[in-house]
Amino acid sequence: ERKMDQLSTAAKPGNTRIGDKQYHHFKINLPEGAKNISVKISGDGSHNLELSMRKDNWAWRTDSPFVLSQPGTDKTLKFDTLPGGYWYVSVYCSDQLKVTCAKNKFTYTGDKSVLNGVPYTIVASWEL
């Protein structure tokens, strides 16, 4: 389990919250013969996080074979089996503010809490 709950000012990039339109990338080394594989993210439920997974390359949501993008923060990818090797997992925060520009002025609308980052937890598990 990895808690991604630190503010950027804490200088702990390996545990920093995710911001609007940002990705967090992870890599797992899945052993041959792994079964009952699960990759789960959970959060406060008030934001929108996407979860994607791909073998041997970055898991961008636009080109990953496994993507969960429904609203909310809680998502779980489950597999009976997968080939062993490196799997890339990405979390994407699809929330964003709307910025309106005027002369010498910017107006931000939407949920501004996303500017402080969205906390979440990620867990990858399997059986041998």
Image (cartoon, rainbow, N blue to C red):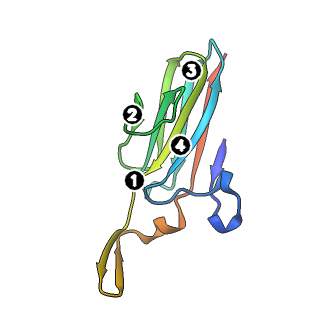
Residue 98 is situated, as x and y percent measured from the top left of the image, at: 33, 69
Q: Which residue is mark 4?
A: 41
Residue 25 is situated, as x and y percent measured from the top left of the image, at: 56, 43
Q: Which residue is mark 2?
A: 63
Q: Residue furthest front?
A: 103
- Label 1 crowd bin: few (<14), some (14–19), many (20+), radius 10 Å: some
Q: Which residue is mark 3?
A: 36
Label 2 sits on a secondary structure element that is: loop
Q: CA distance from mark 4 to mark 1?
A: 14 Å
Residue 84 is situated, as x and y percent measured from the top left of the image, at: 60, 17
Q: Considering only order in the chain, which callout, 3 or 1, is on the residue closer to the N terminus?
A: 3
Label 4 sits on a secondary structure element that is: strand
Q: Considering only order in the chain, which callout, 2 or 3, is on the residue closer to the N terminus?
A: 3
Q: Considering only order in the chain, which callout, 1 or 4, is on the residue closer to the N terminus?
A: 4
Label 1 sits on a secondary structure element that is: loop
Q: CA distance from mark 3 to mark 4?
A: 16 Å
The residue shown at (49%, 22%) is 79
Q: Considering only order in the chain, which callout, 2 or 4, is on the residue closer to the N terminus?
A: 4
Foreground mark, 4 or 2, reads 2
Q: Which residue is mark 1?
A: 94
The residue shown at (48%, 36%) is 59
The residue shown at (65%, 60%) is 6
Q: CA distance from mark 1 to mark 2?
A: 16 Å
